[in-house]
Amino acid sequence: MDKIKIFSPATVANVSCGFDALGFALNNVGDEMIFEKTGTKGVTISNIEGANLPYAIKHNAAGVVALAMLNQTKADIGIDIQLIKKVKPGSGLGSSASSAAGAAFAVNELLEKPFTRLELVEFARIGERVACGSPIADNVAAVIYGGFILVKSYHPLTIVKLPVPKELMVTIIHPQIEVRTEDARNVLQPAIPIADAVRQAANLAGFISSLYTSDYKLLSKSLVDVIAEPYRKGLIPHFDTVKTAGLQNGALGVGISGSGPSIFALSKGEDTAEKVSNAIREVYQNTTIDFKMYTSAINQQGIKIL
Ligand code: HSE
């Protein structure tokens, strides 16, 4: 294989109760990326559409990942990358993760698959560090594995793929403002009270149990975030109003997608998801802030070859 074109999905990290540990991918929202072998060793980026991102390899989330993989395998080829970004950086939808994980997946294909899925997550984390200062794994693991994933531990990196209840749908509103992940991490408290740690752990456990049993009631009650949401919601205009509108119209839960500003709502079934979507849309239609909305089933597959 000399050339590959992929769809690399957008992702929702944290999912309220799983700060830095839970994530899932979306079905129809994500970037397209093209990777082509070249005769000259090293990595080039010949085209970036849809976002103002660096062409310099060491500053580009996809570029650094591809280069690290070529260096590790001592491959005697070069790779050219084209990025067609549909999800903007600073959206809370894992834009850098789509690039980094997409590069890990595609370069692995071009090299005839020397690496495991877990190793691809490790490579993709290099891109996350370049893009947002921390080698977080929740978004990139969701892109590579699909479905819900749990980052069980970082040392050693352990990813658990979790089941997806059949009727689960997600609605996203993406206010067109930028929140940098680094800034959203800086507003968090360096330590949390034991009572909050216990609540978060119990909710995460409840949520994971609900995925295995498709217990939508338990799922709903578990979608609580006492670690990040109280501090980050101030960065997102009208967060509380959106949350109330979503819950009043049947959402199982509403929370900040990753580090924001996107807000996600989980619903059971398409009809409820549509109601929730309409209610949330109405909140932002009454403001001067531009926004985009998406409704999707949970992506079970992760990256797709196009
Ligand atoms: N878990 C990370 C955070 C995701 O919330 O900072 C960044 O998109």
Image (cartoon, rainbow, N blue to C red):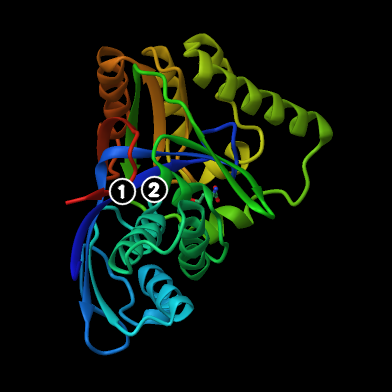
Residue sitting at the far bottom? 40
Q: Is residue 197 above or below residue 250?
A: below
- Give the number of the disc on residue 143: 2
Do the residues bearing badges 2 and 1 touch, measured as CB atoms within 8 Å? yes
- Judged left or right of residue 64, residue 159 is right
Amino acid under disc 2: Val
Q: Of 61 and 275, which appears nearest the observer? A: 61
- From this view, report whether residue 135 is shown above or below residue 243: below
Residue 21: image quadrant is top right
Residue 249: percent from left, percent from top: 36, 13
Q: Give the left or right position of residue 274, taking residue 190 as reference.
A: left
What kind of element bears circle 1?
Answer: loop
Residue 303 badge: 1
41 or 13, nearer to the observer: 41
Q: Quadrant of the N terminus?
A: bottom left
Could you tell me residue 233's position as x and y percent?
Answer: 53, 40
Residue located 40% across and 27% down the image: 265
Which label's residue is closer to the chain start, 2 or 1? 2
How many circles with numbers are drawn on the protein?
A: 2
Residue 93 seen in the figure: no
Q: Give neighbour class at mark 1: few <14, some 14-19, many 20+ (Cα, 10 Å).
A: many
Q: Is 240 situated above or below 50? A: above
Q: Quadrant of residue 287?
A: top left
SS category of the residue bearing label 2: helix
Q: What amino acid is labelled 1 in the image? A: Ile
Q: Is residue 236 visible?
A: yes
Q: Residue at x 40, y 49 (%)?
A: 144
Mark 2 and mark 1: Cα distance apart in space: 6 Å
